[in-house]
Image (cartoon, rainbow, N blue to C red):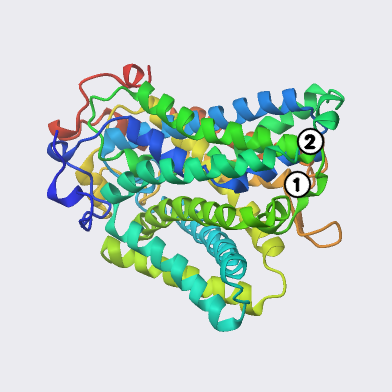
Amino acid sequence: MAASENDRVGSVETRGIEPVPDAERHGHASQMFWTWFAANISILGLPLGAALVSFRGLNIWQAAVVAILGSFGSFALVGALSIAGKRGGAPALTLSRAVFGVRGNAGPTLVTWMSRLGWETINTTTAAFALLALLDAAFGIRRNTVLTVVCLLVFIGCTLLISGLGHATIMWINRWASYVFGLLNLVVIGFLATTIDWGKVFHAPVGPVSSMVVGVGMIAAGTGIGWANTGADYARYLPRRIPGGRLVAASAFGAGIPLVVLISLGSLLAAGEPDLASASDPVSAINTMLPSWMSIPYLIAAFGGLLLSNHLSVYSAGLTMITLGIRVRRTLAVGLDVVVTFAGGIYFILIAKDFYGPFITFLTLLAVPINAWVGVFAVDLILRRSYDGAALMDVGRSSRYWFRGGVAWAAMIAWAAAIVVGLLFTEASTSATDVWFSGPLAHSWIGSNGLGWVVTLVLAAVVYALLRRLDGTVREEASAQPPQAQVLPAPAARELS
């Protein structure tokens, strides 16, 4: 089916969060492959692999297995949740109104928006540092305040251009930029491979199986789980007839291929450079491992990888902002998002003495409610057959998704309970002496090994599955029939096959 005028490469996408009509659906499942390939070809995936060796004591073969399970598994979840976008034609957090209620959905949406802004700020500041280093290496231009602001603006401008144009342009950029930056990354990877201490690699002892289990969780939490609530944003233009299994496979392989390569390489490098796993500025740490003349292609690859990830995040953040109730056009929402990100970049680079530690600590806490949302939303997706497009856009009492007082209490209770339990296993700190928050179970085996997110997600899913049967408003909504145009021709179980 041909693309509509609203979704053409180079044209500004005017659609906001309203569902995409069937007549305007187009594309193939392969689009999800390129979306997640582009988001994960950054050299910054190397420190994840280094952490498996330096912190978990795994050898290269164990690290490779962990990389495969963590990367492919977590992005298979992203692909599964993106089926909701194909079904309902709307962004993930807009579809979430059908799960939490039009008012209850405000909590998960606000948390998601704050988390997106946070990671965008980290991407922006890191990219600015990479661009400053590139100018120094290529032209001998030293860093100063004006140049720092200019570098921030350049990255912000590139992000705004791509995200502002919207879905079709993002899909096109993702595919062709993956070829360009993928090849550039391969060149850099080739030179990094020459620095590997193969003697230490092949003589590394076998680590415990428990460390492999923890490693899988660490890789999943650091890769796919962070994108789980955005997959539907990019699948909403796809035709309903595309099998859900293809979306799962495309997402898993699109992200899994580059991640396994980068994580495995990071594991190899850590044998000779154990400090790589704990570097506060991984861009600079990796740069020092290369010959000086390789700095330029490396820094270009680092900048490009951050840009490909950031424009996806900004696009989703704009849709999330509109879902939150800020009544602006999508393009203006994207603009407001990058303005906030720019302000954050200015503060963290030019004013704050230390921002990575405190900021990532804050984002660690936000990850708990996001994981709880994933658990609830996943169960609803399995049990739900359709979305009512008109009801998704109706935030008043007449909405099918009003439930009781605008809240689906089964979902809200499960979400809140999972957050509380998840925080029990969470410790947020910038160092051993600067602990912001520490749950009473943070130093248990689960907590100290970073598996609290698994407990959070599973508990949210189980509690919601149980409470959903007891909530009369949810049963009533499930039994109602949406407009004929929104009814799927096949049962949900068949879509997930």
Quarter-of-image position of residue 320: bottom left
Q: Percent position (x, y) of residue 466?
A: 51, 28
Q: Percent position (x, y) of residue 480?
A: 23, 31
Q: Earlier in the sequence, mark 1 or mark 2?
A: 2
Q: Percent position (x, y) of residue 319?
A: 35, 55
Left or right position of 146 against 497? right
Residue 359 lies, with reference to residue 414, above or below; the image says: below
> Is there any visible trace of residue 372 in the rendered image?
yes
Residue 447 lies, with reference to residue 242, above or below; the image says: below
- Residue closest to the far front: 293
- Amino acid type indicated by mark 1: Ala
Residue at 33%, 49% (x, y): give it.
Answer: 170
Tell which of 379 and 26 is nearer to you. Answer: 26
Left or right position of 236 against 486? right
Residue at 81%, 40% (x, y): give it.
Answer: 54
Residue occupied by mark 1: 277
- Amino acid type indicated by mark 2: Val
Q: Residues within 10 Å of mark 2 (few under 14, many from 20)?
A: many
Tell which of 83 and 126 is nearer to you. Answer: 126
Q: Percent position (x, y) of residue 471?
A: 42, 34
Cα–Cα gap, marks 1 and 2: 9 Å
| Residue contact between numbered discs 1 and 2, judged by CB atoms under 8 Å | yes
> Is there any visible trace of residue 227 in the rendered image?
no
Residue occupied by mark 2: 53
What kind of element bears circle 2?
helix
Quarter-of-image position of residue 236: top left
